[in-house]
């Protein structure tokens, strides 16, 4: 499981946009996004750089958390 910090989310629409973007990345089996925590949890074997790129293409900032 990979944890991403996601900045810029303000509403439920943001959550759905980030989740859909993550689920489109090859290798992602499941994605959960939390507005309160400003994080996304991703299960699967996706490339972290591809996950970050997908989130940033939706207009949000993302980084991998240790």
Image: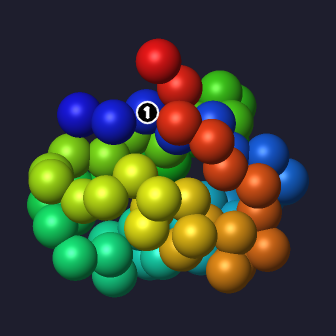
Q: Which residue appears farthest toward the top when viewing the image?
A: 66
Q: Residues within 10 Å of mark 1 (few under 14, many from 20)?
A: some
- 30 w.r.t. 6: above or below: below
Q: Nearer the viewer, residue 51 or 17?
A: 51
Query: Which residue is drawn at the image coordinates 67% and 50% (left, top)?
Result: 62
The image quadrant that residue 60 belongs to is: bottom right
The x and y percentages for residue 58 are 69, 78
> In screen coordinates, is 29 left or right of 31?
left
> Which residue lies at the image location 32% right of the left edge and 46% below the top edge?
42
Where is mark 1, residue-wise? Answer: 3
Q: Could you tell me which residue is drawn at 85 percent across and 53 percent down? A: 8
Asked if residue 48 is positioned above or below residue 18 in the image, the reply reads: above
Q: Where does the N terminus fall, quadrant-wise?
A: top left
Residue 53 versus residue 52 in the image, above or below: below
Residue 6 relative to residue 24: left or right: right
Residue 64: x %, y % from top left:
53, 36
Q: Would residue 52 be seen by someone viewing this image from the given angle?
A: yes
Percent across and percent down for residue 31 are: 33, 54
Image-based side of 10 in relation to 29, left or right: right
Residue displayed at 15% across by 54% down? 45
Q: Tell me the SS state at disc 1.
A: strand
Q: Quadrant of residue 11?
A: bottom right
Please indicate whether residue 59 sits to the left or right of residue 58 in the image: right
């Amino acid at each position: 499981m990979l944890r991403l910090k996601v900045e810029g989310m303000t509403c439920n629409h943001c959550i759905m946009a980030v989740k859909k973007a993550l689920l489109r990345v090859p290798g992602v089996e499941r994605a959960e996004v939390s507005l309160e925590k400003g994080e996304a949890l991703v299960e699967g074997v996706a490339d972290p750089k591809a996950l970050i790129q997908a989130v940033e293409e939706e207009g949000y900032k993302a980084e991998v958390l240790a």
